[in-house]
Amino acid sequence: MKSLISKKSTLSLLITTLTLASTLSACSTTTDTTTDKPASSAAPAATKPAGNAAEQSPEGKYDPPISVSMVRDMPGGLTFPQGDSLDSNVMTKLLEQTYGVKIENKWVTDGVTYNDKLNVAIASGDLPDIFRVQPIQLKQLADAGIIADLTDVYKKNITPLADEKLRTDKGVGLASATLDGKLMGIPYVNAAIEGAQMLWVRKDWLDNLGLTEPKTMDDVYKISKAFKNNDPDKNGKSDTFGLGFYSNIFGGFGGMTGFFNGFHAYKNMWVKDPKGGNELVQGNLQPEMKQALAKLQELYKSGEIDKEFSVKTADQLLQDIVAGKIGMFYGAFSEPLNKLNKAVTADAKQVWEMYPLPSVDAKPALAQVTAMPAYYWVVNKKSKNPAAAIKMMNLYVEKIFGKTADFKFMYDGNFAVYQYQDVKTFGATKNLDHFLAIKAGLAGDMSKLNPEGKGYFDQVKQYQSGDKTMWRYAKIFGPDGSEKVINKYVTENQLYYDQFTGIPSELMVEKTGTLGDVTNETFMKILLGESPDLFDKFVANYNKLGGTDITKQVNDWYGKQKK
């Protein structure tokens, strides 16, 4: 990519990017690194604040207050106390009270149409002061000179606690936001480890059939066959399936990622060459993926996977789970919070347990994860107060993790307050930290519990005292909750991070739709019955369509990281 490109060509490319960026997982993921500090910490200050005293320290407050424009997407189902809204709520009021920053949302939309509206704003040049972008957009907006260099304002205004939380990924996020030595955005540093998949199983069905918990893929096959053929729910009908999937085979809940990982196959990510080479290769193209697809085809042909899975949505899969038709599925640690809570609420006989990913051989299965931020917050170069974005981050971290933290800033009754503010971070290990602190608290040591953790601790205790409505929290944070699996992955080194941590190139963006389509189409054809040898033709076609050139770019980047 050229280091300097015209603003006109960049805006044109950005418009294209906005329609493609949601499928960039094959090109824009990362791994954990050993970076002690992001490059921005050593970079010379290139942009100085306008002299406003409020922008010279973390404690600085704008007086008189300033107005800062943003654009937002509002999560579906988000609710507010009476009289409040996304424009005026506890967080916006605290921001004005603490830092003298008033938020004005130029527009608010849902997550589906956010990029479309941002596309229009970029094309028209009508951009707000602060807005959220994806990795390739960060690079292109920086090249076009549209967004501000935050190097100096970050160093002067970030609180030590906020800086600490933004570095819990070992600096991956901040380093990725640092272009040519300049910090051009604030990364969303979240718990990458919690993207790791696990296997969810109907434990009551295991007990009904006298089966033991799955430890190997052979166990999974045995259980799947029994769940299909041996009437696990004892209703006298053949109406159950061993494994639950739906049309998005690469999805999180109900996707096939965990099954692939059991074969040491890694979808849509860059891995070290399994043959022992010194280069990175695309996980979708490896022979382990072919083996996993062939086995899934067997399970499909035997009826252990619903014959209609390829046309079902995630909601329809959930309906089947709630109705008691599915015995196993792959998902995340958080499935009890909403999806499985609906199942056990509808049918108290359902007992769900989660297990680490079983392996096809003697090597432990590694759950794939990525630490690359999904997005960044950037500041319009025309903004008069670039430090306002840093102040927002400071406030959020303080109210979740600091001395004035309170559980009400996560949840206030049924109100998801943590979603009210856009600029935020949770750090890379928040929920695992809560699990370990709650475990210690249940053993009598309450010292490690912060206000949010104490809130979850109380919910676990309520469940243990008989309040079944707290099942969803106990099944995550309790002694035998899903975070126990995450902790096993971490302590036993059973996570595999995407090895590519760079910003995707223009070629990656250009080709991601085509390569994604050919991958999905080929995998689905094999799953539904075509010869697994179709995979070999797919690999050749993938490389011919741009895969070879992308692999070269990835390894050019990888070679520079090793120097």
Image: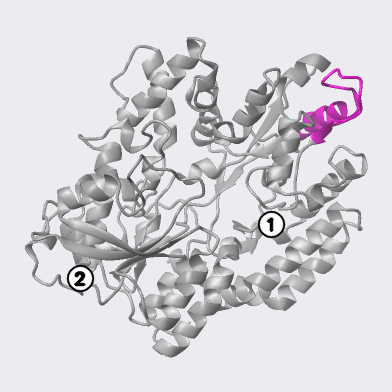
Q: Magenta segment range?
A: 217-242
Looking at the picture, tell me which residue is in the foreground, 118 or 370: 118
Instruction: Tell me where residue 459 sits by quadrant.
Output: top left
Looking at the image, residue 60 lies above or below residue 458: below
Let me know if residue 559 appears in the view. no
> Which kind of residue does numbered mark 1 sit on?
Lys
Q: Is residue 48 left or right of residue 277?
A: left
Q: Nearer the viewer, residue 8 or 261?
A: 8
The answer to whether 402 appears left or right of 77 in the picture is left
Numbered circle sitting on residue 44: 2
Element at badge 1? loop
Q: Is residue 221 above or below residue 385?
A: above
What residue did someone put label 1 on? Answer: 275
Residue 353: x %, y % from top left:
65, 24
Question: Mark 1 vs mark 2: which is more N-terminal?
Answer: 2
Residue extending farthest top: 465
At numbered mark 2, what does the secondary structure look like: helix, strand or loop? loop
Residue 129 located within the stretch drawn in magenta? no
* Residue 121 placement, left or right of 274: left
Q: Is residue 237 magenta?
A: yes
Determine the residue positioned at 39% across, 42% down: 80
Residue type (three-letter) at the residue carrying disc 2: Pro
Q: How many dots with numbers?
A: 2
